[in-house]
Image (tube, rainbow, N blue to C red):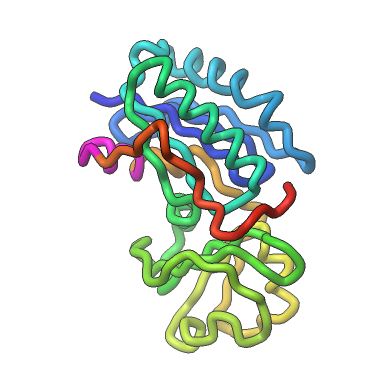
Amino acid sequence: MAYILCIETTTTNCSVSISKDGKTIALQEENRENYSHSENLHGFISKALEQAKVSKSQLNAVAVSRGPGSYTGLRIGVSAAKGLCFALDIPLVSIDTLQAFAYEVTDETDYIIPMLDARRMEVYACVFDGNKNKLEKIKAVILDENSFAEYLEKGKVIFLGNANEKFKPVCNHPNAGFLDAKLPSANDMASLADYKYKKSDFEDVAYFEPYYLKDFIGG
């Protein structure tokens, strides 16, 4: 039996969950227009532990969403995760943000493309098949009417994330579907975190750094 604290701070959604054997048993999160992670994160951790009726000493690992995303959000989340790992002497697990985010899609589809807003018409994106298997590396993409055309021509594609509002006006393909009002959540990290924990796929707590993908972008 493994209890894992999951932390997701890559966007404006400050999110914390407790998982037990790959299932979420407690969730605390809040999405504000302005980042509130520095004020709320540690309080959410305490509330999630209380909700799950789990003490810090019972935690087997901490999982953190590694990016890409907000530079500031990533720094806050990773710093908190590393501090807890040092204090409790437990391992650190890192989770690809967009891979976990893909688990928000529950409808049947051929492809899933989570996208996070970067700047102007640029997004951070990754392509998965309908079973959440990664087909491409995470990359920065400048959106236009031809973006992801090779997948749209082959089957149904569900796009999700805070970049949908940028892509909808330029994407008119009949195979495109949009899952709106979704942001990465610690609720989606449980199964991936448990899988990596069982494989002892851990990070070096002292040297682990978030995956920024690009140089500093304010936010």
- Camera-nearest residue between 1 and 39: 39
Q: Residue at x 27, y 41 (%)?
A: 201
Residue that sits furthest to the left in the current view: 199
Q: Residue at x 47, y 82 (%)?
A: 151
Q: Nearer the viewer, residue 116 or 139?
A: 139
Which residue is nearer to you in this view: 150 or 103? 150
Q: Position of residue 84 (x, y in %)?
A: 45, 21
* Image coords of residue 36 (percent x, y): 72, 32
Q: Is residue 84 left or right of residue 40?
A: left
In the picture as drawn, the residue positioned furthest to the front comes out as: 207
Q: Which residues are magenta?
A: 192-200
Task: List x then y, in percent, for residue 187.
Answer: 48, 38
**Residue 195 in which image quadrant:** top left
Above or below, 90 relative to 201: above
Vertical relation: 190 (above or below) 134: above
User: What is the quadrant of residue 205 in the picture?
Assistant: top left
User: Does 161 sit above or below residue 15?
Assistant: below
> Is 95 within the magenta?
no
Locate residue 97 relative to residue 59 in the image: left or right.
Answer: right
Residue drawn at 41 percent across, 13 percent down: 56
- Counting labels gives 0
Among the 4 quarters of the image, the one containing residue 2: top left
The prevailing secondary structure element of the residues shown in magenta is helix
In the rendered image, residue 196 lying in the magenta stretch gets the answer yes
- In x, y percent, where is residue 213? 54, 59
Quarter of the image where the N terminus is located: top left
Query: Residue at image x 53%, y 27%?
Result: 80
